[in-house]
Image (cartoon, grey):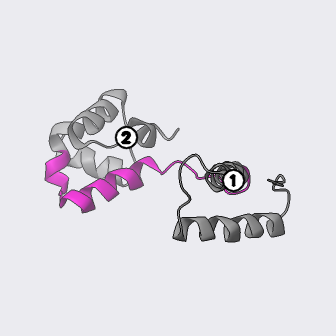
Amino acid sequence: MNIRPIHTKSDYKAALRELSAYVDNEPRPGSEDSDRFEILATLVEAYETKHFPVKAPDPIEAIRFRMEQAGLTVKDLVPYIGRTNRVYEVLNRKRGLTIEMVRNLHRHLGIPAESLIGA
């Protein structure tokens, strides 16, 4: 099977090239090619996690994104954050989110709690 760890960018690019061939022509489950594909995908994922970590979204950007997605206005956030002036303070980063606000935004608007607490 001759698979090696991915140590360098050139190793990474070679693994991606090989993976792309399998994506275009998916191997039969249980075959040696299928096992090779799975191992290569695992190695690529590990390399990407180490070298290209994804940062958690900013809490305010997460709220703004949900507002844009759902066509929400500041008034729509009042039940979850508080009065209009408080919503503006939060969106302008003049006031932080409280635990209750995080719970409400998560529960009612489906914004991931991890995004809201900045984890």
Q: Residue at x 76, y 64 (%)?
A: 12
Residue toward you, 107 or 25: 25
Is residue 113 among what the camera can see? Answer: yes
Front of the two marks 2 and 1: 1
Q: Is residue 47 left or right of residue 104?
A: right
Q: Residue at x 50, y 41 (%)?
A: 118
Q: Residue at x 14, y 50 (%)?
A: 76
Q: Amino acid at mark 2?
A: Pro
Q: Quadrant of residue 27?
A: bottom right
Q: Quadrant of residue 64?
A: bottom left
Q: Which residues are magenta?
A: 50-77
Given contact means CB atoms under 8 Å apart, are the residues at marks 2 and 1 in contact?
no
Residue toward you, 78 or 65: 65
Which residue corresponds to mark 1? 36
Q: Is residue 106 left or right of residue 26?
A: left
Residue 83: % across, % down: 18, 42
Q: Is residue 11 above or below residue 97?
A: below
Is residue 93 among what the camera can see? Answer: no
Q: Which numbered circle lies on residue 112?
A: 2
Secondary structure at badge 2 equals loop
Residue toward you, 75 or 50: 50
Residue 8: % across, % down: 85, 62
